[in-house]
Image (tube, rainbow, N blue to C red):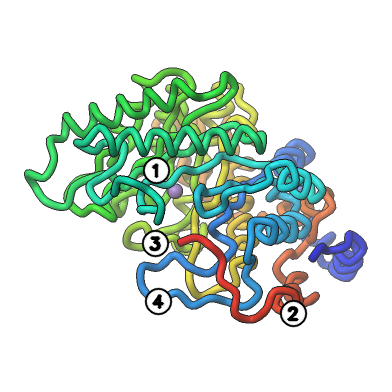
């Protein structure tokens, strides 16, 4: 289904009085309001193809109604999200869950909806029915060269699918690791991984990047071969300028200072991009901003400061993507909430009084430095995000419009009540 522009405009009109009052009140205190709005309007977050169905659990999976049954229907759902918020103009595919059989028609369907393809993701953490060797003991780090070869070939195949769709990056996350001490020689596992990644790296087109994701534990519980940002950074440094580290917010041990990691990776030009989600205990795949919104704001503070220091364009010089999928919410509503939370944190970071913060830091004025950050964080910037969405042709309140016009009910009518999307 597609949402007519007129429906969005009519609903915006209904909300206009209250919104205008709130926006003007807020705008009066922001010096470069037009610049802030311009940045918010340019900011887009990619939607992963596996987040459009309910899932994200190793235990029971309880499908919701009207889930997309095909890649075409997943693209249609991203089209709905983007029509409502005007901040989700790309989709990130996972191979083999979403193999584009006919790339030309998939590409034209996406571009009709104003969408393009973000990074493609490989999968060597599961065995596929037709594959020769098992990944039970790992893939790119495997002790058996034949298994490594198969995993390398898969990644090269994913690049080929991505090229057909005009994607520009391969995102690699490995489940490789060990469950028990003694199972692995750590150096051997690292060397095998590096050599495998070099073979994949050599197949990248000139204008492509490889993003190397890390994760401390799960599915392996003793060691992970790319377990933290240091190991990812080491690999991406050895590979070369097309390789960089991908930060997934859920892939850190509790209380890790993620904002400091972000700051240093940016300083080194090695921050590839982001997988947004939130976490209470581990890789929980909870909705961005639902558990630790202050941490999300502090991360955006480092992102904005670090990107500005290098003269980078916020919207496009880093890959922004959501990586979450869970069991109890309507996936489209969850993704709308996620993008809103990201834009709120970004807007708060944009309104920080940067010069005052630099001065406070130079004077070791700790109390004022904290005041400056919290002044921005405690500002209700939702009218700013709403105004940016409205000016881009989206809704002032995407979720309430989604509910009001009964999108899910229509999707159930079109697709049926018992549909299951491919994915986690
Ligand atoms: Mn991820």
Q: Is any part of residue 376 visible from this angle? A: no
Q: Is residue 178 left or right of residue 114?
A: left
Q: How far from the left and from the top, in percent, is residue 410?
A: 76, 76
Residue at numbered disc 4 = 60
First in residue order: circle 3 vs circle 2: 3
In three-dimensional space, the C-alpha distance between marks 4 and 2, rounded to whole angstroms, equals 25 Å
- The residue at 60%/72% (across/down) is 330
Secondary structure of the residue carrying tag 1 is loop
**Alpha carbon distance from label 4 to label 3:** 15 Å
- Estimate how packed mark 3 is, as few (under 14), some (14 to 19) or many (20 or more) residues with alpha carbons within 10 Å: some
Q: Which residue is mark 2?
A: 413
| SS type, badge 4 | loop
- Residue under pointer 3: 284
Q: Residues within 10 Å of mark 1 (few under 14, many from 20)?
A: some
Residue 265 can be seen in this image: yes
User: Which tag, 2 or 1, sits closer to the chain's start?
Assistant: 1
- Residue 331 picture location, percent across and down: 59, 67
- Which is more N-terminal, label 2 or label 4? 4
Q: Nearer the viewer, residue 90 or 275?
A: 90
* The quarter of the displayed image where residue 104 is located: top right
**Nearest to viewer (mark 4 / mark 3):** 4
Label 4 beta carbon less than 8 Å to ligand 1: no
């Amino acid at each position: 289904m597609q949402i007519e522009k007129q429906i969005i405009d009519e609903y915006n009109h209904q909300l206009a009085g209250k919104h205008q009052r709130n926006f003007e009140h807020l705008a009066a205190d922001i010096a470069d309001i037009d610049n802030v709005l311009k940045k918010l309007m340019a900011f887009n977050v990619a939607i992963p193809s596996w987040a459009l169905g309910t899932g994200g659990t190793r235990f029971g999976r309880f499908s919701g109604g009207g889930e997309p049954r095909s890649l075409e229907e997943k693209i249609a759902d991203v089209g709905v999200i983007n029509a409502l918020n005007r901040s989700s103009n790309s989709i990130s595919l996972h191979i083999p869950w979403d193999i584009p059989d006919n790339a030309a028609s998939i590409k034209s369907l996406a571009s009709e909806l104003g969408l393009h393809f973000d990074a493609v993701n490989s999968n060597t953490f599961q065995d596929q029915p037709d594959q020769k060797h098992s990944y039970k003991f790992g893939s790119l780090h495997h002790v058996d060269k034949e298994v490594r070869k198969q995993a390398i070939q898969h990644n090269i195949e994913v690049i080929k699918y991505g090229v057909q769709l005009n994607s520009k990056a391969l995102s690699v996350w490995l489940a490789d690791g060990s469950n028990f001490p003694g199972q692995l020689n750590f150096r051997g596992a690292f060397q095998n991984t590096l050599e495998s990644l070099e073979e994949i790296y050599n197949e990248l087109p000139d204008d492509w990047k490889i993003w190397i994701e890390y994760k401390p534990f799960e599915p392996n519980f003793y060691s992970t071969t790319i377990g933290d940002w240091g190991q990812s950074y080491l690999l991406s440094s050895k590979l070369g300028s097309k390789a960089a580290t991908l930060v997934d917010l859920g892939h850190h041990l509790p209380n890790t200072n993620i904002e400091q990691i972000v700051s240093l990776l940016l300083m080194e030009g090695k921050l590839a991009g982001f997988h947004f989600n939130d976490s209470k205990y581990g890789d929980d795949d909870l909705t961005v901003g639902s558990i630790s919104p202050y941490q999300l704001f502090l991360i955006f503070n480092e992102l904005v400061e670090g990107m500005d220091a290098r003269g980078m364009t916020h919207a496009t010089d880093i890959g922004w993507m959501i990586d979450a999928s869970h069991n109890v919410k309507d996936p489209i509503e969850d993704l709308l909430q996620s993008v809103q939370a990201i834009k709120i944190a970004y807007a708060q970071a944009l309104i920080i009084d940067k010069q005052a913060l630099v001065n406070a830091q130079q004077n070791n004025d700790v109390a004022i430095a904290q005041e400056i950050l919290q002044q921005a964080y405690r500002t209700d910037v939702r009218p700013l995000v709403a105004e940016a969405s409205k000016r881009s042709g989206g809704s002032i309140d995407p979720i309430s419009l989604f509910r009001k016009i009964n999108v899910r009910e229509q999707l159930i009518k079109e697709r049926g009540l018992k549909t299951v999307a491919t994915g986690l």
